[in-house]
Image (cartoon, rainbow, N blue to C red):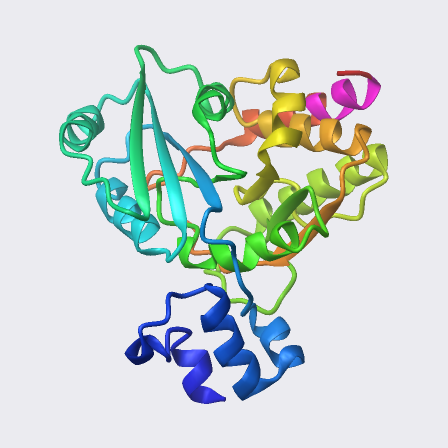
Amino acid sequence: MSAVLKSPRMFESENLTPYSQAWYERFRNTLGEGLCRQLGIYAIHPDTVLSVVIPVYNERATLLDLVDRVRRVPLRKQIILVDDGSKDGTRDVLRDLEANPRHDDMNTIHVVFHEVNRGKGAALRTGFQYATGEFVIVQDADNEYDPSEFPRLLQPLVEDKADVVYGSRFMGDYSHRVLYYWHYLGNKFLTTLSNCFTNLNLTDMETCYKVFRRDKLAEILPTLKQNRFGFEPEITAKIARRRLRIYEQSISYSGRTYDQGKKIGWRDGFKALWCIVRYAIAD
């Protein structure tokens, strides 16, 4: 058991591709189907592509490391980086990456530039327009969220149990960095208020990790309006209104301090309150 938990690629010596049918069968024959399900071990069709949309604003210190971590996830991916008017040299890093994207069988990279800062929600709308994969995930560029958890987040979608999956920082069985108490209370309050209006029972509405079926996201995309962090309550309300199937999966979280570049502030909290009420009324 401990060997499995330490290395989900334990059969690499047999040249089995992670998440292939043969890889899954080898695990299932060794561990049993029930334990495989608990550990997030399952098969993904080799033609499945995950579009990873990464909004970027002043992330020069972490960007290349994050891109490398995303590239290492053993799934076929379309990586879409949207620079939202960075001023710290991030754009130079992205231009170098655009000139030498290092495409391979598992990864393609597409870079888009906003000439002025418009906000996370605007960057995501731009990125979603370029997504071509069957599934689409939001990934921040600051290393707070761990891309190695993509396969677990995808599982309910691949098994056709869900249309949307939220990665929850508060479900309790994965580690997270201990930081700001008032941020925690603010997140819980906004999630609870959102739940009151949407009749959902989410534990983390404000999470970055949201994964969509692209066809379902395409239905919502033309209605999205929020340019900043109001994107989170807006899209949650619109998902609920369409009665899409929603799952939550626990995730780890390594939060940043404001000295390390954390951007969300109290004004965004008040905007989220407004968005919860506004989008509960209508699209």
Nearer to us in this view, 223 or 151: 151
Identify the image quadrant of residue 194.
top right
Magenta stretch: residue 274 in it? no
Q: Is 80 left, or right, of 152 in this rendering?
A: left
Q: Is 103 left, or right, of 118 in this rendering?
A: left
Q: Residue at x 47, y 30 (%)?
A: 132
Q: Is 179 left, or right, of 182 in this rendering?
A: left
Q: Residue at x 51, y 79 (%)?
A: 27
Identify the image quadrant of residue 90.
top left
User: Residue 22, image x and y in percent?
Assistant: 47, 71
User: Residue 140, image x and y in percent?
Assistant: 42, 40
Eyeballing the image, is 214 above or below 123? below
Residue stretch rendered in magenta on the structure: 275-281
User: Residue 15, image x and y in percent?
Assistant: 31, 73
Nearer to us in this view, 68 or 86: 68
Eyeballing the image, is 31 above or below 41? below
Q: Is residue 256 visible?
A: no
Which part of the image, by quadrant, shows the C terminus? top right
Q: Residue at x 26, y 40 (%)?
A: 63
User: Residue 146, image x and y in percent?
Assistant: 42, 55
Q: Residue at x 54, y 70 (%)?
A: 41
